[in-house]
Every structure is written in C-alpha cells, then in structure tokens.
C-alpha cells in the first residue's frame, strides 16, 4: 500500500505527517506501507520549515533531509490513499486525476475527537507563532496515529 500526504508547499504539514507515519508504522511493525508527500504549489527542492524540523526532532524523527516536491499525476495515480490537509488540496488532487476521488481523504477524518474551534482542515501554521505549529502538529499527531493503526488493521484502503 502507498500513502501520499498533500498540503500546499510540502514544507510543513505533509512532510511532518509523512515522517510521523513512517515512525509510528516502524514502531508497530508495519513494513508494507510506502509513505510520501507532495504540495499543490509545485515547490521543488525547498527544505522543511525550521520549526517543523525542530518539532519533528522532539517527536523522534528527522525532517532535515526532506526536500519539497510538487504534486503530480504519477504520484496521485500510484497512491492507494491520498491524505490531504485541507479541502482545496483534495480538490487539486481530483482535478489532476478524477479517478483519485475515492482514494482521497482529509487527514481530519482520522481524528477521533475534534477540539472545539477546529474545522475539517488542518490549518497551515507558516508565518505564525510557534504555538500554532505546536497546535497543528498535535492535531496531525492524533490523526496520523489513528491512521497508522487503521492501516495496521486494514480498516482503510
């Protein structure tokens, strides 16, 4: 199975989700899932945001080597599950490949309990205070943890 996370620039949310899912899957013994990420803005080769790198390191994985990738049809066509941060990312995926619609989900769909005041999308913290990054990553952490166990027990496809 192949999972693709999608956000805007592929420098904060989707690489964080990618790295976290890889770490959790390794911890729970799932070796059959390939994980990647891409961004709808088409930014190529940019490093992960420094705040994301630091907060990822605190959670036990390294975003230092990450370089952004733009979303493309090949990645969308290959992915079994495309997990988007916001509705407009899902729309971009489907516009790129209409056949991807049934394989495209919002990350927030994997959130068992949504905190008051949060919407269905995972908001972009870029350019905001470190507390916004922390809030964003706590939410991604909850969703990705649930996704990892869903993948382990094949509750998603």
Image (cartoon, rainbow, N blue to C red):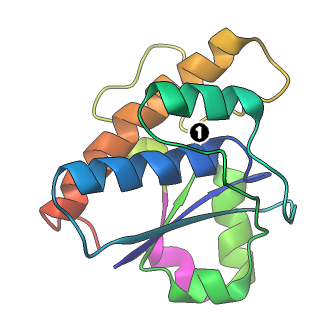
Q: Which residue is mark 1?
A: 121
In percent of the image, x 46 and y 28: which residue is there? 139
Q: Is residue 67 left or right of residue 150?
A: right
Q: Position of residue 133 (x, y in %)?
A: 64, 22
Which stretch did the figure color magenta?
Answer: 98-105
Look at the image and say whether residue 17 sits in the magenta stretch. Answer: no
Quadrant in the rendering for residue 25? bottom left
Indicate the secondary structure of the residue bearing disc 1. Answer: loop
Does the rendering let one see residue 146? yes
Q: Is residue 138 left or right of residue 98?
A: left
Does the rendering let one see residue 119? no
Could you say which is closer to the camera, residue 34 or residue 139?
34
Q: Residues within 10 Å of mark 1 (few under 14, many from 20)?
A: some
In percent of the image, x 79 and y 49: which residue is there? 47
Q: Position of residue 95 (x, y in %)?
A: 74, 77
Q: Is residue 40 left or right of residue 7?
A: right
Using the image, determine if residue 135 lies above or below residue 59: above
Using the image, determine if residue 157 lies above or below residue 17: below
């Amino acid at each position: 199975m192949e999972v693709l996370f999608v956000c805007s620039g592929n420098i904060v949310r989707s690489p964080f989700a990618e790295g976290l899912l890889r770490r959790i899957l390794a911890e729970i013994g799932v070796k059959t899932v390939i994980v990647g990420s891409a961004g709808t803005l088409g930014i190529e080769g940019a490093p992960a945001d420094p705040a994301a790198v630091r907060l990822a390191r605190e959670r036990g994985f390294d975003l230092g080597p990450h370089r952004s990738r733009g979303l493309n049809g090949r990645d969308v066509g290959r992915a079994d599950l495309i997990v988007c941060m916001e509705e407009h990312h899902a729309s971009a995926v489907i516009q790129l490949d209409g056949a991807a619609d049934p394989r495209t989900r919002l990350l927030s769909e994997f959130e068992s309990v949504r905190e008051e005041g949060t919407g269905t999308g995972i908001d972009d913290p870029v350019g905001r205070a470190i507390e916004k990054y922390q809030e964003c990553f706590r939410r991604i952490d909850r969703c990705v943890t649930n996704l990892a166990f869903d993948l382990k027990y094949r509750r998603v496809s």
